[in-house]
Image (cartoon, rainbow, N blue to C red):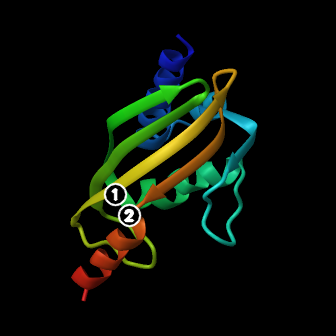
Amino acid sequence: MMSEQNKQIVRRFNQQVIAEGNRQAFDELVAEQFINHTAPPGMASDKQSLWNTFDRVLRPAISQLQVSLELLVAENDIVSARKIISGYHTGPLGGVMETGLPIVISVFDMVQIRDGRYIAHWGLNNLPEVIRQLQAASH
């Protein structure tokens, strides 16, 4: 039962927080003591920096942003997800000005949930490769 509830939390986070930019949902779903274990080197790994990734990096750069959860696997307090973040490159991203091109970011995430809130995150994505492709297309 806990695994299914945790999967619902991940679904809600991806739709309401990433796709829709809902700060209230973010605050409800992410614990104050949250730690992002795979934050980029030199970047903060706390709750606010997670919000900034969506609010100041992805959402301004990608219009018509959608999140497609391809796979969710849950065990105990851990949920792993394979997802696709897609849309159109209509704002600066990784130093590349808008190209208008379709953008597709593949993501593998693992989150730990306690009391209905994210407390930890680990993840891999192909954003650096996507940025390289956008750089090549913009020249």
Q: Disc number at residue 40?
A: none
Q: Disc number at residue 105?
A: 1
Q: Residue at x 43, y 53 (%)?
A: 59
Q: Point out residue 113 in the picture as x, y percentages from the top left corner.
A: 63, 30
Q: Residue at x 49, y 27 (%)?
A: 74
Q: In front here: 128 or 122?
A: 122
- Left or right: residue 133 versus residue 114 is left
Q: Point out residue 57 in the picture as x, y percentages from the top left corner.
A: 50, 61
Numbered disc 1: secondary structure = strand
How far apart are labels 1 and 2 at the CA level? 6 Å
Which amino acid type is shown beneath numbered disc 1? Ile
Q: Residue at x 33, y 69 (%)?
A: 130
Q: Disc number at residue 126?
A: 2
Q: In front here: 15 or 91?
A: 15
- Left or right: residue 63 versus residue 37 is left
CB atoms of marks 1 and 2 within 8 Å: yes
| Quarter placement of the C terminus | bottom left
Task: Tell me which numbered mark, 1 or 2, is placed earlier along the sequence.
Answer: 1
- Left or right: residue 130 versus residue 118 is left
Relative to 106, residue 101 above or below? below
Which amino acid type is shown beneath numbered disc 2? Asn
The single residue placed furthest to the top in the displayed view is 1
Which mark lies nearer to you, 1 or 2? 2
